[in-house]
Amino acid sequence: MLKGLAITPPVVGRISIGRVVEKAGKRLPEKDDQFTLTTQVQQRDGWMLHPLNETLRKATSGKLRAIPVRFLFNDPGLNLRAEYSLFDRDTGRPVCVGNGETCRRAGDAGIEELPCPSPDGCAFGRAGNCKPYGRLNVAIGDEDELGSFIFRTTSYNSIRTLAARLHYFSAVSGDLLACLQLELKLRGKSTTQSYRSPVYYVDLTVRSGSTLEETLTKAREVDGQRRAAGFDQAALDAAARQGFANGAFEDSPDERAAVAEEFYPDVAAGPAQSSQEGKASGDLPAGPPGGLRAKLERKAAQLDATTP
């Protein structure tokens, strides 16, 4: 295994609730009020739709706002990884990635380990549009038992809700998260910050038409069948945990530009005004002294000087 390269779950498609559109000569993210499943192939007019996108839409009478899913791992933290991330909008490279306690920041001497006070308490983060970034891997359908679709988000609501649900379902099922038949559901709410307009986020529930008790009973049956067939879920979780730990950053270099374009559109201009659904992370060599990192440090120093 190559050291420094994060080994992540194989991805066969993407789940999004928005897209990138061109406005006034600029490519900007635009939110949506329904799910879209795409392949990993991007053309001039956007990502190619995955065949499952049409299949799922035929099964619903309205917009696609629910997707039946299952998880690859029993450990909630392997299915959903969330970090505070700051990206260079021009290059797509990560500048700083942290968990609220420690961070990995690209410096002149390489990757530095530093304290992470979260974006609100970090002048460097406030200067550069640092925000939460989550990646959720789910399996859809039965064609590829170990393949997954990835949902990337920078929404506080989605990350917080999905993290809570994953831990709750893991607890009530007796650590059988990978055997549960669940459903991603798009919900909407309005807040003062959204000026009463609906803000959509992703939730996780039992599948429509099922109860929690029925879902738990089915999960125990699936677990028994897997054990009888020799399926080693604990070993799969351990392999995934080792793969994630093998690299400093998760996203591959060829994904970074698309991540920055879709979810970090305002990094070069300064702090973001609102949180959006999103992506992020990767491996970054140190930038030039006059690059983005130096500009952010100057902005951070100015913020520190003006903060009482």
Image (tube, rainbow, N blue to C red):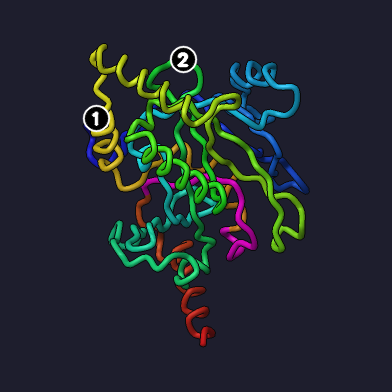
Q: Which quarter of the rendering shows the N terminus?
A: top left
Q: Magenta segment range? A: 267-283
Residue 234: which numbered mark, if any?
1
Which percent across, then down, holds residue 171? 36, 41
Residue 32 lies left or right of residue 133; in this view the side is right
Which residue: 45% across, 46% down? 163
- Would you call the spot at circle 1 few (<14 residues within 10 Å), some (14-19), or many (20 or more)? few
Residue for badge 2: 142
Residue 179: which quarter of the image?
top left
The correct choice, above or below, for 176 with respect to 132 in the image is above
Q: Which element type, helix, strand or loop, lies under badge 1? A: helix
Count of numbered labels shown in the rendering: 2
**Secondary structure mainly formed by the magenta segment:** loop
Cβ atoms under marks 1 and 2 closer than 8 Å:
no
Res 44 seen here: yes
Q: CA distance from mark 1 to mark 2?
A: 21 Å
Residue type beneath disc 2: Asp
Closest to the observer: 4 or 293? 4
Which percent across, then down, holds residue 151? 52, 36
Q: Which element type, helix, strand or loop, lies under badge 2? A: loop
Which percent across, then down, holds residue 202? 58, 41
